[in-house]
Image (cartoon, grey):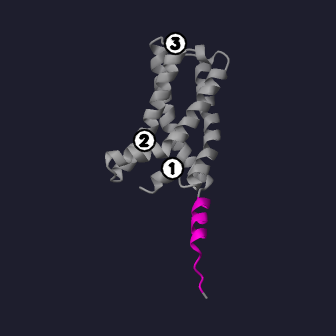
Amino acid sequence: MDHTLPHHTEHHTHQAAASWGTAVKATLHCLTGCAIGEILGMVIGTALGWGNVPTMALAIGLAFLFGYSFTLFAVARAGLSLKAAIKVALAADTVSIAVMELVDNAIIALTPGAMDAHLTEGLFWYALLGGFAVAFLITTPVNKWMIGRGKGHAVVHAHH
């Protein structure tokens, strides 16, 4: 009797392999890069007295830069060429960073007074950190869904 599984169930098993633990790790990875970039952007923009729009633009740009760079350096260390590493980082992190930034910045924008708060005020930090917390909760299931379909951070794991 042949006990091998048909080929189509192998694909189904791969999709089911996306655990919550894997999704949490991928989201924490994303959150780390986003947080460094966003906090740096907010600090720079606020310290220079920039308005809300240029400060948020800088923060979001740096969030993407740092978010991508974490993956880029990890897969480059694994032996990928720079071009291949960039493709992997873009495939792995774009949706995750975009969701994280959209949610985080929406929370900050919708928190009364947060956009006008200064670095020395608790409201600035509560809104920022609260935004990260909510973004983490929303982005984790998105990452789980993507990894289960072989996308997002599943692309990175293929190169580790």
- The residue carrying mark 2 is 70
Q: CA distance from mark 3 to mark 1?
A: 35 Å
Label 2 environment density (alpha carbons within 10 Å; few <14, some 14–19, many ≥20): some
User: What range of the chain is rendered magenta?
Assistant: 2-17
Lower position in the chain sequence, tag 1 or tag 2:
2
Choose between 10 and 110: the one closer to the eye.
Answer: 10
Is residue 153 placed above or below 59 in the rendered structure?
below
The residue at the point 34 percent across, 50 percent down is: 77
Is residue 72 placed above or below 11 in the rendered structure?
above
Secondary structure under the numbered disc 1 in the rendered image: loop
Q: Looking at the picture, which amino acid does disc 1 mark?
A: His
- The residue carrying mark 1 is 153
Secondary structure under the numbered disc 2 in the rendered image: helix
Label 1 environment density (alpha carbons within 10 Å; few <14, some 14–19, many ≥20): many
Q: Looking at the picture, which amino acid does disc 2 mark?
A: Phe
For the C terminus, which image quadrant? bottom left
The residue at the point 47 percent across, 55 percent down is: 157
Main SS of the magenta part reads helix
In this view, the residue farthest toward the top is: 49
Q: Which mark is residue 51?
A: 3
- Res 119 seen here: no
Q: From the viewer's perspective, is 138 left or right of 59? A: right
**123 magenta-colored:** no
Q: From the viewer's perspective, is 65 left or right of 2? A: left
Q: How many marks?
A: 3
Q: Looking at the picture, which amino acid does disc 3 mark?
A: Gly
Residue 37, x across and y down, in percent: 46, 30
Residue 75, x across and y down, in percent: 39, 49
Residue 125, x across and y down, in percent: 58, 23
